[in-house]
Image (spheres, rainbow, N blue to C red):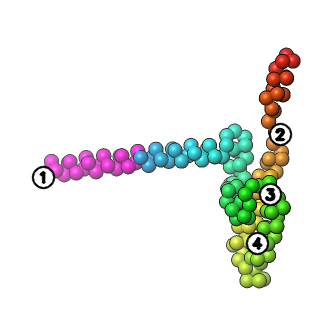
Amino acid sequence: MAKYLAQIIVLGTQMVGRAFARALRQEIAASQEAAKRAGGGQQGSQRVAANTKTGLTLDEALRILNADRPDQVDLIERNYKYLMEANDRSKGGSFYLQSKVFRAKERLDEEIKATQSTPPPKSDETKQDSASTR
């Protein structure tokens, strides 16, 4: 009887250990994928800071304001105004939805500001010219 009980305990421990290892591998893979999507270095740090500040990712903000790219400023502005008016509390709208729309616009403004403040990378020709002048 004790032999069977010991076998059950050992098998149960092995199953839990395998499940834990599998979950850990999946979490590591998901973390690496998220890091890859966020970009690396300073640009990735800026993106994470903007996500934390507004509580939305860039993708979520684009979906809320029904835009494909953050550089569609006119479309974003038009959709923002429409959604804010449609969800006005005096007209029976939702303050919660208004705040989501506002945060989405704020997140896209942060992204536009970050892309405008980042200087464009040097082209290969410029790098070669500077290397040949040395």
Residue that label 4 marks: 83
Q: Are marks 2 and 3 in contact (CB under 8 Å)?
A: no
Q: CA distance from mark 2 to mark 1?
A: 73 Å
Per the image, is 43 magenta?
A: no
> Secondary structure beneath disc 4?
helix
Residue that label 2 marks: 119
| Position of 121 relative to 127 (above/below) | below
Q: Which residues are magenta?
A: 1-21
Amino acid type indicated by mark 1: Met
Q: CA distance from mark 2 to mark 3?
A: 20 Å
Amino acid type indicated by mark 2: Pro
Which residue occupies the foreground of this view, 6 or 42?
42
Location of the C terminus (image quadrant): top right
Q: Residue furthest bottom?
A: 91
Q: What mark, if any, has residue 1 been given in the picture?
A: 1
Q: Which one is earlier in the sequence, the residue at label 2 or at label 1?
A: 1
Q: Which one is earlier in the sequence, the residue at label 4 or at label 3?
A: 3
For label 3, count other residues whose C-alpha is less than 10 Å away and answer few (under 14), some (14-19) or many (20+): few
Q: Are marks 4 and 1 in contact (CB under 8 Å)?
A: no
| Position of 75 relative to 50 (above/below) | below
Q: CA distance from mark 4 to mark 3?
A: 16 Å
Q: CA distance from mark 3 to mark 1?
A: 72 Å
* One can see residue 110 in this view: no
* One can see residue 106 in this view: yes
Q: Which one is earlier in the sequence, the residue at label 2 or at label 3?
A: 3
Give percent across and percent down for residue 56. 68, 59
Q: In terms of image quadrants, where is residue 72?
A: bottom right
Give percent across and percent down for residue 78. 82, 67
